[in-house]
Image (cartoon, grey):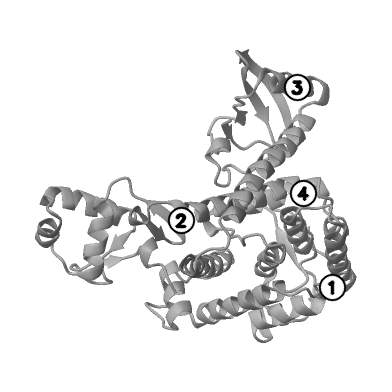
Amino acid sequence: MNFSLDDTSFEKAQISAVTTHAGGNMVLAARLPPVFPREHYGQKKYRLKYCTTSWVVYCHVSGIIAALLFCLYHFSGGIFAYQWYVSHLCIINMAQLDKLYRQWLDIQPLSADDEKRLKRKFMLDFNYNSNHIEGNTLTYGQTEVLLLFGEVIGSAKMKDLEEMKAHNICLNMVEREADTDEPLTETFIRQVHQVMLREDYKVYRQLPGGETTSYTVHAGRYKTRPNSVITPTGERFEYASPEETPALMADLVQWYNNAISEGTLTPVQLAALFHYRYIRIHPFEDGNGRIARLMVNFILRRHSWPMMVIRSKNKKAYLNALGLADAATGPIPADGAHASLKSVAPFVEYIESALTADISSMLEFLSGDREMMWWYEGEIVRFSTPTPARILRVLQSNPNASLSAISTTLGISRSAIQKQMDNLAEKGYISRPEGKKRGWIVNMTSVISYEI
């Protein structure tokens, strides 16, 4: 099933035409909300691609499903067809996720070496991506050196360095707490926030008239002033007021603890719904996105699921999925703080897809040919031939190796080595030291050497 989508106004959201239907397949031209994600989240089978002409959905489906969509088009004006698509895709994603989760359980317990490699990978991936989403400027390499060795390479802002270290401590707090049987409390959430921000600080802003105003961001305390965000359409989207926040947070924590006892939601649904409700409250003046993503992993780990990473490169899709849930839930903060699973289905689908990609990546790491696999900025790179990996290993042992030396060592022509190195450099896998024209830095890590 492939989809191509492009912008249109939400007010005109409707199925516009069924253009062809033959042999059980059909092409459906559709107009859908502008916040619908333009790219899918790791599943090639259901990839959404950007199209510059119109919102066009290419549905390669059975004749039965095609007929159903055709009826929905005629009798609902298209909106129900769109809602049906989201619900149907959630079911498909959950089935695929359950299958991968069973495969994950089948290989437990992991060997000590595999456990260490995966732990190190997740620690770096999660800290880098969750902070990068919020504007932290450290590179993946700087994050790795900082968190593993306590050192700083290149130029970096002190705020970003301290923020990254504090976030890693928060991750450790969440992991330890998730491994207990203690009920979730507001106190714990505030403690994590206190560690993340470290201390209160002032934010200064210049008003249109030239005057400067300021407010205090409180570490570990709920907000004392309203907060909101400006949407892409220029509208102000309000979160819960400071007066509403304590009661809504109490409701959220109580709901979560009750939901565990009831057992009607899967851990993934529980994590996605908690994230969404928490974000609609936005209880702190800063750090809400990072706390939300930490709490997703708190819930997953407590229920013996692998933890997940929302990657900064997918930030737009992540925010789009939240935006779709906002559109279904409505603008009233209290409604968002008590949102139903159905209304946040697009965000649940996003979380399921992201987690599916993460578990698939972990299974690939554990079962694939490690000689051919490398990490690059937290993701697996699998080379189709042995040559690039062999070149990388030569450069790791001798960063100043010349083309002739590499050619002699590997028994490959200089031209072939040059072509491979140009390709590695173009993709950022290798780079020159800053300000130098000789020598190479290998920006990748071999899966084999990925140990703590």
SS type, badge 3? helix
Where does label 3 land, which residue?
68
The label nearer to you, 4 versus 2, is 2
Mark 1 falls on what kind of element?
Answer: loop
**Which residue type does callout 4 highlight?**
Val
- The 10 Å Cα crowd at callout 1, few under 14, some 14 to 19, many 20 or more, is some
Residue topped by disc 2: 365
Q: Amino acid at mark 1?
A: Pro
Distance of label 1 from label 4 (alpha carbons): 24 Å
Q: Say few, some or many: other residues with alpha carbon within 10 Å of mark 2 (under 14 / 14 to 19 / 20 or more).
A: many
Q: Nearer the viewer, residue 28 or 351?
A: 351
Find out whether the residues at labels 4 and 2 contact each other: C-beta distance under 8 Å.
Answer: no
Marks 1 and 3, the one that precedes in the sequence: 3
Specify which label sits upstream in the sequence, 3 or 4: 3
Q: Earlier in the sequence, mark 1 or mark 4?
A: 1
Q: Which residue is denoted by mark 1 in the rendering?
A: 242
Q: Are marks 1 and 3 in contact (CB under 8 Å)?
A: no
The residue singled out by tag 4 in the image is 344
Cα separation between marks 1 and 2 = 46 Å
Q: Is residue 387 left or right of residue 301?
A: left
Residue 437's spot in the image, x, y percent?
19, 67
Q: Quadrant of the C terminus?
A: bottom left
Depth check, mark 1 against mark 3: the one in front is 3
Looking at the rendering, which quadrant does residue 180 occupy?
Answer: bottom right
Q: Is residue 76 visible?
A: yes
Q: Mark 2 is on which residue type? A: Phe
423 left or right, relative to 234: left
